[in-house]
Amino acid sequence: MWDHEVDVLCVGGVVGALASAVVAADADAEVLVTGLAGGDRGWPADHVADEETLAYFAALTDGLAGQPISAGEVPVRPVRPLTAAERRGRTVPPFYGARLKTWTEQCLVSPYGLLHTRVSYWRTTTMRTLDNRPVQVKVIGTVTVPAAGGPPPLATWLNGEARMRDIEIDDDAVLQRIVFEEGVVVGAVFDTADGDYAVRARHGITLAPRVAHPVADYVRGEDEAEVALVSEIGSRFARVELLTAAPPPASVPSAACSSSNRQLPKSLRESRRNRSEPRRSREMNGHPPFGQ
């Protein structure tokens, strides 16, 4: 029996939970944010006793979940849009399992990391980094620096973005366990002052770490900053980052090809037409016709 039902449930730290909630709300999803003030510091799943929840998180993090979350400034990533040739390309980028593991570790120890139980319905844009690697990007919004004073703290700005979208926020609930049906995440149960509170999530849950230290300033000498969720392709983990413009790729001149309407001389056409069938078969197929 569910006490509440939403499309996306965002649990944990202010930065990751609110960033994911804003992205989901912009995709016309019904969102609930909870657990911002309650519970211990760290990832929400680190402090539950439910064995199924712990096993699920351990499988996703591949034994990396025990590392402490480090303080630091908001990551800055130079990116560029795909070129016309890259958008038309039919090649599939190679998959690097080791790269995904490294990315998971970076998100786990970052106060700006988050985990999606699903990777669909995120509507990301593929962009390229300085080393020409593809990443998935979802822009949250642009922060404008006021004329007097510094930029607002990132958590304050995200809270304002969530309030403008009328996102439902419940600060005091503490994650008790994740609910599964046939191995699929379908919701979560929380401890509240009034007892257990079960929330169904139609399109998945976002988990984000809660941190004790304040979020550092994130705009350095700029008039505005673009805040986005960034992820490696195929990963359930993402991170709140600042985007800057990367230089366009160096153009590689291509060989020019021109068409020609010239025809073979008549004598050459006749000689090609009069070749024997076995000879033509050997030249085209590398072997004589069947039976010869």
Image (spheres, rainbow, N blue to C red):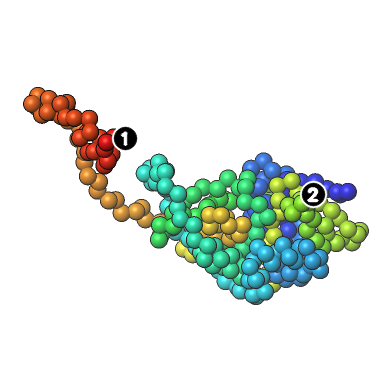
Specify whether residue 262 is in view.
no
Question: Residue beneath label 1, please?
Answer: 290
Front residue (pair 199, 53): 53
SS for dot 2: strand
Question: Residue beneath label 2, please?
Answer: 200
Residue type at mark 2 is Arg
Front residue (pair 201, 283): 283
Image coords of residue 271 (percent x, y) = 12, 28
Residue at the spot 74% in from the left edge and 46% down from the top edge: 202
Q: Indicate the quadrant where residue 211 lies.
A: bottom right
Q: Seen in the image, is 61 located left or right of residue 178?
A: left
Image coords of residue 44 (percent x, y) = 74, 65
Image coords of residue 102 (percent x, y) = 54, 67
Residue at the spot 36% in from the left edge and 53% down from the top edge: 248
Image coords of residue 234 (percent x, y) = 56, 54
Specify whether residue 197 is in view.
yes
Instruction: Tell me whether the residue at label 2 lies in contact with that at label 1, contact meaning CB atoms closer than 8 angstroms.
Output: no
Which residue is outermost to the front? 291
Numbered circle sitting on residue 77: none
Q: Indicate the quadrant where residue 149 lies.
A: bottom right
Q: Seen in the image, is 46 located left or right of residue 190?
A: left
Q: Seen in the image, is 46 located left or right of residue 22?
A: right
Residue type at mark 1 is Phe
Which residue is outermost to the right? 194
Instruction: Classify 10 Å Cα crowding around label 2: few (below 14), some (14-19), many (20 and above).
Output: many
Residue at the spot 58% in from the left edge and 45% down from the top edge: 123
Front residue (pair 213, 65): 65
Q: Earlier in the sequence, mark 2 or mark 1?
A: 2
Q: Seen in the image, is 285 located left or right of residue 93?
A: left
Q: Is residue 190 above or below residue 64?
A: above
